């Protein structure tokens, strides 16, 4: 399969269009699936036919070795009682627990789905749409939000993937990485603001402001003042 280089989202979309199977799974170039990853997720999908998106945990590594044994929200933090993060905090690491249902609100708080762990019904993608090729880096977060808004999601609390942490060439200096992503998350959240149930509009606006605040503070500490000024002006639209 060949196409001109139009970015990673365009490449993934081409792969989805060409795929003939019932399910779609993604594997970024430097990531690694554990040998039984697909077998375990197919088994879960067959036992839960109502579920359209399955994801699991991943360990994080780089060229120097293991960085984190889990890529899920940390377990030593207090979360809103009953939320997905709260439930994860109360489980044992890698214990195979399954959580399923409405993940939309939890994803609005922040993205916790590692792309290379995702396993999706192709029909779901046909209905909700593919990756937004204009969003580049946060196109996966945008897709999870669109799916979760109208489809049930399942989390399998098991390591199925090794995620390689790599410096992002789009963000330049690796020290800017977290602030770079915080500012881009706004793009995915803004799309939801225009198309979400009224119940979530206040939450989304608050999350957008939190993303701006985090990015502004980070860039300020790194003396990236032009970026600070730009983000401050954009944030005024939501204050």
Image (cartoon, rainbow, N blue to C red):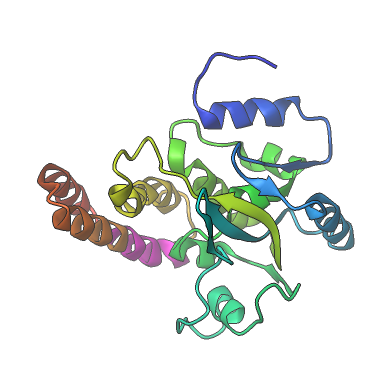
Q: Is residue 211 magenta?
A: no
Residue 156 can be seen, yes or no: no
> How many numbered discs, if any?
0
Region in magenta: 199-209
Residue occupying the point 49% across, 50% down = 165
User: Relative to the observer, which residue lies in front, 30 or 196?
Assistant: 30
Quadrant including the N terminus: top right
Position of 109 relative to 64 (above/below): below
Answer with left or right where residue 220 lies relative to residue 21.
left
Q: Which residue is painted at 62% across and 30% down in the image?
A: 13
The quadrant the C terminus occupies is bottom left
Q: Is residue 154 left or right of residue 184?
A: right
Q: Nearer the viewer, residue 54 or 209?
A: 54
Find residue 225 and report its horizontal and vertical position in percent: 10, 47
Where in the figure is residue 229, as x and y percent of width and height?
11, 47
Q: Main secondary structure of the magenta part?
A: helix
User: Residue drawn 71% across and 27% down?
Assistant: 17
Residue drawn 54% across the image and 32% down it? 9
The answer to whether 228 is drawn above or below residue 106 in the figure is: above
Q: Position of residue 176 (x, y in %)?
A: 28, 49
Indicate left or right for 118 with 65 as reference: right
Q: In this view of the protein, can residue 93 be seen by the observer?
A: yes
Residue 201 falls inside the magenta stretch: yes
Q: Residue 104 occupies which quadrant of the picture?
A: bottom right
Expressed as whole percent of the image width and height from the top left, the position of residue 54 reads 71, 57
């Amino acid at each position: 399969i060949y196409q001109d280089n139009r970015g990673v989202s365009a490449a993934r979309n081409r792969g989805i269009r060409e795929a003939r199977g019932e399910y779609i799974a993604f594997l970024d170039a430097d990531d690694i699936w554990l040998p039984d990853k697909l077998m375990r997720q197919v088994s879960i999908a067959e036992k839960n036919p109502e579920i359209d998106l399955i994801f699991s945990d991943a360990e994080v590594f780089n060229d120097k070795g293991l960085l984190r044994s889990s890529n899920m929200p940390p377990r030593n933090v207090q979360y809103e009682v009953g939320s997905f993060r709260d439930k994860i905090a109360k489980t044992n690491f890698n214990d195979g627990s399954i959580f399923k249902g409405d993940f939309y609100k939890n994803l609005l708080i922040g993205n916790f789905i590692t792309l290379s762990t995702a396993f999706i019904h192709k029909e779901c993608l046909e209905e909700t749409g593919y990756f937004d090729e204009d969003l580049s880096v946060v196109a996966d977060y945008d897709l999870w939000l669109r799916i979760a808004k109208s489809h049930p999601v399942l989390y399998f609390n098991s390591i199925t993937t090794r995620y390689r942490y790599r410096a992002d060439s789009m963000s330049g200096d690796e020290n800017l990485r977290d602030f770079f992503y915080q500012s881009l998350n706004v793009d995915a959240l803004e799309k939801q603001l225009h198309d979400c149930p009224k119940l979530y509009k206040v939450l989304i606006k608050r999350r957008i402001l939190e993303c701006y605040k985090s990015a502004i503070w980070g860039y300020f500490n790194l003396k990236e003042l032009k970026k600070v000024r730009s983000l401050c002006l954009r944030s005024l639209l939501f204050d």
